[in-house]
Image: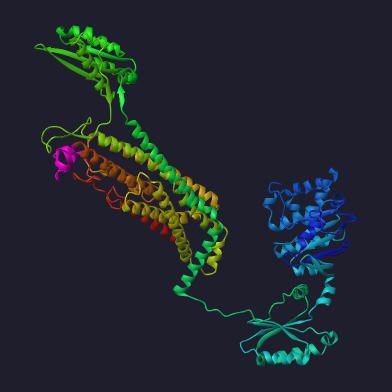
Amino acid sequence: MSLDILSQQITCLLGHNGAGKTTTMNMITGIYPPSSGKILVNGYDVSTATREARKSIGYCPQENILFNDLSVEQHLQLYAVLKDIPSDKIGSEITRVLTIIRLSDKRHWKSSLLSGGMKRKLSLGIAIIGTTEVLILDEPTSGMDPEARRAIWDVLQHVRREKTILLTTHYMEEADILGDRIAIMSEGVLKCCGSPMFLKKRFGAGYHLRIAKTDNYNKESVDTTLKKYLPDSRLQSEINTEVIYSLESDDRSKQTDKNIFPKLFDELESRKQELGFNSFGITVTTMEDVFLKVGSYEEVDNGKKGSQEKIEKQYKNEDGFKLIQMSVLGLLVKRFHYSRRHWAMLLFQIVIPAVLFILVFLADNSVKSVATEKSKSITLDLQELYGRTIGFYHDLDPTTHDFGAHHYIPNAERHGITANILTKQTDPKDWLLEKSRDFEQYVMKYVLGGAVSNTSGTLRPQIWFNYESTHSLPLSINLMYESLVRQSVLKLKDFTITTIVEPLKSWVFTGSEPLKSWVFTGSGKDKEYYNALIQNMMAAGVSCVLLMPITLPFLAASYLIYPIIERVSKSKALQLMTGLSSAVYWLSNYLFDILNHLLAITLLSLVVYMFDVNQAFFKGWQSGTAFFLLLLAFGLSSISIAYCLSFWFNSSPIGFSLLLVFYLVFGFIVNAIYSGLYLITTAGAALAGPTTPMGTTQEDGFMWLIHAFRLIPIFSLNYGFTKIYMINVNKQLCAKQMDAIRESSGHLWPSNTFPTEWPDQWPSFFPDAPLYNQMTSCKYLNPLILNPAGIGRELIGLTVSALLFIIVLLIIE
C-alpha cells in the first residue's frame, strides 16, 4: 500500500469485511507495527517516533469505548487532560466540541443514558478534542439511523477545514458525499484511489436500464430493440420480476447522442404491452457500481468469477404432518449440535449425580457398620456406666437387718454406691418420687435398691431398678445375689458376679410342645426386631433423606438453561416468526430432553447397580424397574416445570442457580420434617407393638402432607427412594430372622423339616408387610404397587405433575 492522505480533505477507505481497513488504521495509530515500509504522520515515523506522531492523532474506534458512570462532560475532560490541554482552556474546549457534535444539552448526562447515535457523537468528540490534526475514524456512523448519520456528516463537513480525516464506511452514499478522495482496498492491497468523479469515469458502467417484467415478457424482442439503438448493450442480471441491462459502450459520444435515448425511450414506452413489461427506468453510475466493478476485477484475478446462471430455484412447500415431521427433525438436529458444542453440560447431568450416588452408598455402608459395631458385647460395670451413684436398702424385717447392714450396704459401697437404709415405715415410692424432682440426677444417680423379707425362715429378696437407666435391672440383680452369696458363704467375702451383655438370637424354644411354646427372648416380644427396624430407618434417614436430595437437582435444574438462552437471545422468536408453531417448538425440545434424560438415568442406574453392594435399591428386577421408572417420571415432571419457569428468568446462570437451590432446600427441609415425624410415629408404634400394617400409621397421620407435595418432583423422588430402600432392607431383615429361627429351632424337627403352620403367637411377631406369614419364606413386596408401601402413587403424582405443567406451558404460550 502506498497512499497519501491529504490535509483538509476527507479520504474514504472502502473495502469488504476483512479487507484490512481496521488493520491499516491500527498501524497508522501505532497499535500494530507495519510488516515493512514506513508510516509518516505530520513527518513523524509511527514506528520510531510513536509518541510524537500520536500527539496529532484523534482516533474514533469502531466500537464505543465509554464509561457508563461518567457524564459526557467528564469523558471530554478526561481525554482533554490526556491530550495535555492546559487546565485553564479545558472548559472552553469542551464547550467548543459539544457545540460541534451537538450534545450541549446532554452535557451532564451519563453515557449509559445516551442513545446509540449520541454515543457515536461522543466518541467522535473524544477524537476531535484538543490540538488534533489527524482524525482516524473507523465506521463513525455504523448502527445509526439516517437522521443521526446525516448529523455526523454535518460535523465532519465542519471539521474538515482544519483536519486531515481518514474514515472507513460501508455506506457507498456516505463515501460519495463526504469523500474528497476514495481509496478501495482488498485483502490488504490498495486497488485504486481517486475522487468520486474520477472513479466513476474510470470504472463506471455507463447507464443501467431497469425493466419491470410481466408474465408475458418477451426477452428476444427486448434484446433486438436495445441492440438496434445500442449495439454494445448487454444483459446484466435477471430475476423473477426485474431485468437489468447495461448500456455501457466504449463509444461514449454515441451513447450520449441526444437523439438516441429519446428514440429508444419512445419505442419502449409505446411497445410495453407487446414486449411484456410494466415500466422501465434509467440510472447512472453510483459508487456502489464502482465498488462492485473493482470487486469483480479482483474475482477475475483470483479465479473466483462465479457462474452467471440463474441461482433461483423453485421449491414445493410442505404442509400437514410432513411439515411437522421435518420441523421436529430439524429442531432435534439443532439441539444435538448445541449439546455437542456445550459438552460441559454433561457435568451437571451425569458426572455430579453419579459421584453423589456413590457417596450415598458409602455413607449408607458407614451407617450400617456403625450400627453393627454398637451391637457388640459389653461388660456391665456400675461405676464405668454411671459413676458414683445413690441406692437404698429397705429394712422390712428386723431379722434381716444384719443382712442389710453387714452385707448389702458394704457390697454396695464396693461398687461405688452411697446406700441409704430406709426404715420399715418409709415407703420407697414416696422417697424416690421426692428424689425424681431433679429428673436428670434421678436418672443418672438413683439406679438401684433392694430389700429382703423373712417368711417362715425363707429369705425372699426384692429388686428395685430404675426403668429410665438401661442396665439398671441386671446390675441390681447382681448386687443382691453377690450380697446373698457373701452372707451364706462367709469365706467368699470377695465374691463377685460379672455380667456380660451380648446380642441374643431373637427366638429360642422352651418347653416340650414345639407348636405351643414359642417365646421372644428380648425385653418385649418384638423389641429386637423393631430395634433392627429402627436402625434401618435411621440408615434410610441418612441415605434417602439427607443425601438423596442432593443427587438429582443438578440434572433437573439443567433443563432450564436452554429455553432461557433461546428466549433471551431472540432465537426462539426468530423461529416462531418463520412460521414454526409453539407446540412443535416445545415438542421437539421435550423429545430431545427426554432422550437426554434417558441416557443420563441409564448411566446413573448402572452406577447405582455397581455400587449398591447392600442391594438397597437393586434387589431383584422389580426394585430395579421401580428405581428406573421413578427416575424417568422425575425427568418428565422436572422438564415440564423447567419449561414453565424459563419465562421468569432473563439469565440462564441465575435461573439454574435459583432452581437448584430450591430443589436442594426443598428436598432437605420437607423430606427431613416428614421423615422425622414418620420415624417418631413408627418408633412409637414399634414400642407399642405391631398392631397395624407397615405404612398405615404415616398414611393416616400425614396424608394431607403427602398429597400436597407429591406434585413437586424432588419430594416424590426422595419419598419413592425411601420406600424402595425400606422394602429391600426389611426383606433382608426378614431373611436374617428366618435364619435365626432355623438355627434356634432346627433340632425340634427331624432333618430340619419345619412345620407348615404357624404357632399361635407367631403372627403377632411380624408386621403384615413386607413380611409374609409363612414359616419357610418372606414375602417380597412389589415396589410398583399402589398401596402406601409402594411407589405407584409417586409415579402417578409425577406423571400428573408433568401433564399439569405442560398445560400451564401451553396456556403461557
Picture coordinates of residue 24 (x, y %)? Answer: 79, 60
Provide the residue span drawn in magenta.
Answer: 745-766
Query: Quarter of the image containing the N terminus?
Result: bottom right
Q: Residue at x 22, y 29 (%)?
A: 523
Task: Decide if residue 428 is on the left or right side of residue 326.
Answer: left
Q: Residue at x 83, y 76 (%)?
A: 202
Residue nearest the viewer, comparing 502 with 354? 502
Q: Which image quadrant is residue 377 in? A: top left
Q: Residue at the front extreme?
A: 751
Compared with residue 610, is residue 472 higher up or lower down, i.e. above or below? above
Q: Residue at the right extreme?
A: 43
> Is residue 517 at all visible to an observer of this figure?
yes
Q: Residue at x 43, y 46 (%)?
A: 357
Residue 756 on the magenta segment? yes
Residue 473 on the magenta segment? no
The colour scheme used to paint the residues is rainbow
Picture coordinates of residue 190 (x, y %)? Answer: 81, 67
Compared with residue 293, is residue 607 higher up or lower down, i.e. above or below? above
Task: Decide if residue 345 is on the left or right side of residue 666.
Answer: right
The number of numbered badges drawn on the structure is 0
Picture coordinates of residue 132 (x, y %)? Answer: 85, 53
